[in-house]
Amino acid sequence: MYIGIDAGTSGLKAILVDRDQTVRASRTVKLRVSTPHTGWSEQDPESWWQALLEAIDGLKQDDSKAVAAVTGIGLSGQQHGAVLLGDDDRVLRPCILWNDVRSEEECHEFEEAFPESRAVCGNIAMPGFTAPKLLWVRKNEPDIFRQTRHVLLPKAWLRMKMCGEKIEDMSDASGSLWLDVGKREWSAAALEATGLNIDSMPRLCEGVDPAGTLSRELTARWGMDKAPVIAGSAGDNAASAVGLGAVRAGDAFVSLGTSGVVWCTTDRFRPNTDSAVHAFCHAIPDTWHQMGVTLSAASSLAWWAGVNGVDEATLLAELPDRIERPSRALFLPYLNGERTPHNDGRVRGAFLGLDRSLERPELTQAVLEGVAHSFRDALDGLRDAGSNPTSADMVGGGSRSRTWISILASVLDLDLHRLAHGEQGGAFGAARLARIAATGDAVEDVCVPPVRTETIAPDPSLVEEYEDAQERYRAAYPLLSSITTAGHGVPHHAGPHGHHYGHHYGRHHH
């Protein structure tokens, strides 16, 4: 038996998985985010710890015999958060989260101090990443910075509480801007640019490796037969990819959640910061991934439903079974900026091409198409960096709409697979990593893809028309960017996940 834990922003989920990869029990504990100032987002790490204890206590209540047989524990976590530890590993201040945007200025300072950062770290410095947060602390909370002995990401802090060791996996470390992502080691130059050194960092390991053993106290608390091994584990998006079996070069998935992610697994480090593509290590050794992020995916449809005073299902039911031509209206889904390819937190969305003959269903179609065009921008950023997936799995709440997937397939010109169980998320991937770490089972034997229930192919009659629409979509961005200068205090950078991350990253997740 294996436990997978996903420490997200809005909740912590723990699941119990058996050798047949059946989820035997699941517990979720809600978490709250604190916003002491506009643009700030913080959590008390102690709240994660109490949630973890409550969740696994709950699993024990549900199936004490299965929990007793647990041999491995895996962690998936919200990325980029900064947990600052002083002497005696005391937490010095609340964790600054991935969606905190206070450190925009420090992003520029970081890249000035470390001009090679994009090439080495594989990403543009954005306020969501960890390194700029530490520059902000150094400048604004100098006493706290002076006391800081270690900086841990959220799941590494939870691991420390579980086993007493400071260890981080490659995928989560990639989101700090302190990792040399190609070499899979800490970058002394990146750390120096934030006034830190390698002594401040946890030991690195691969996500499939054993990385600590559960403490005697917790093993006794949960009535386990022997102390389970803790896997190196993964950041939330990489954990979701493990759960989807996206572990081989060329494997791809599209997450149509609150925000959107286009993921492609790669066999080498392939950054493309010019298009605001994220390039990270995967949780699997000698494997990397690229990720394009769109900030308003399913949330665009939720917004449009709210404007109309109905739910999303009502809007989708008004559409024809088969889309015969693109909408005459064009929707740009920049409701709170855009990540890939523009890295523009100030741009805002629009409907273009409106006339009196347009009715609600055609505008709803335009919303679905606009989100699809934003995914196409992200996919093209991945293609420019050398990835060329031929198909992708669909996950996220929006993937329940067959119409939306069919539009996406034609806009992306990709075969898209609907899944029987696409919502397992980071906790399921964490449980798979726990099994590999505990047993030494082969990655390819454990990380099998979920059952695909249907493949939706591009509609040949629409592909070319959507290509023309994509050109109009791209032509509109510079115009919108120039007229939506009313940023209302919104920083130019958008933080590195539009979500929940649950995935995400769904949150993943994502």
Image (tube, grey):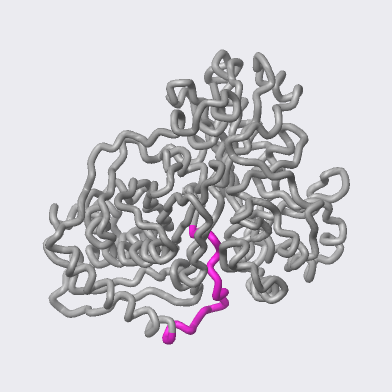
Give the magenta part as a residue range: 482-498
Magenta region, mostly helix, strand or loop? loop
Viewer-side residue, 454 vs 502? 454
Instruction: Tell me residue 288's x, y (percent).
Output: 52, 50
Viewer-side residue, 297 vs 130? 130
Horizontal side of 17 relative to 334 (left or right) equals: right
Q: Quadrant of residue 320?
A: bottom left
Horizontal side of 251 relative to 124 (left or right) equals: left
Count of numbered marks = 0
Viewer-side residue, 184 vs 130? 184
Q: Residue at x 65, y 14 (%)?
A: 225
Q: Residue at x 66, y 16 (%)?
A: 223
Instruction: Tell me residue 133's x, y (percent).
Output: 69, 63
Q: Quadrant of residue 60?
A: top right
Q: Residue at x 22, y 48 (%)?
A: 456
Residue 91 lies in the magenta-colored region:
no
Instruction: Tell me residue 5's x, y (percent).
Output: 57, 35
The answer, for residue 11, to whether it is visible in the render is no
Residue 494 lies in the magenta-colored region:
yes
Viewer-side residue, 37 vs 395? 395
The answer, for residue 349, to whether it is visible in the render is yes
- For residue 309, above or below residue 257: below
